[in-house]
Amino acid sequence: MKSDTLQQGITFYENYARIFGFDTHLYSTKKRKSDGKISLKNSVCNKEGF
């Protein structure tokens, strides 16, 4: 899925998780070296790694 803004994408995944019975958390963020803007943000299931 592609969203217009970062916040729309995060909200979609949080709502999806709630519907299917799991929680999420932000796992990592990467910024571009050239201008410091966020280029990637990972949101994962809160059970990730267990």
Image: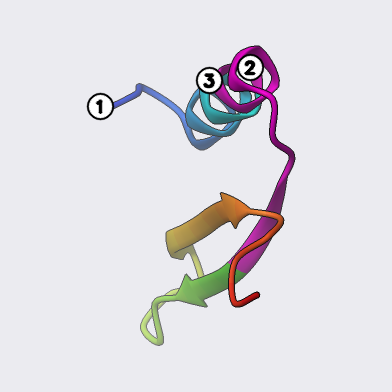
Q: Secondary structure at mark 2?
A: helix
Q: Are marks 1 and 3 in contact (CB under 8 Å)?
A: yes
Q: Crowdedness of circle 1 by 10 Å Cα count: few (<14), some, many (20+)?
A: few
- Horizontal and vertical percent position of residue 3: 34, 23
Q: Crowdedness of circle 3 by 10 Å Cα count: few (<14), some, many (20+)?
A: some
Residue type for callout 2: Asn
Residue type for callout 1: Met
Q: Earlier in the sequence, mark 1 or mark 2?
A: 1
Kindly identify which residue carries mark 2.
15
Mark 1 or 2, which is nearer the eye?
2
Indicate whether 26 appears above or below 22: below
Quarter containing the N terminus: top left
Q: Does residue 4 appear to the left or right of 15 in the view shown?
A: left
Q: Does residue 13 appear to the left or right of 25 in the view shown?
A: left
Q: State which quadrant residue 28 falls in.
A: bottom right
Picture residue at 65% right of the left edge, 28% below the top: 14
Kindly identify which residue carries mark 3.
12
Determine if the magenta segment contains residue 21.
yes
Kindly identify which residue carries mark 1.
1
Picture residue at 26% right of the left edge, 28% below the top: 2
Q: Are marks 1 and 2 in contact (CB under 8 Å)?
A: no
Picture residue at 50% right of the left edge, 36% below the top: 6
Q: Are marks 2 and 3 in contact (CB under 8 Å)?
A: yes
Q: Residue furthest left?
A: 1
- Horizontal and vertical percent position of residue 11: 62, 23
Q: Does residue 11 appear to the left or right of 38 in the view shown?
A: right
Residue type for callout 3: Phe
Extent of the magenta region: 15-27
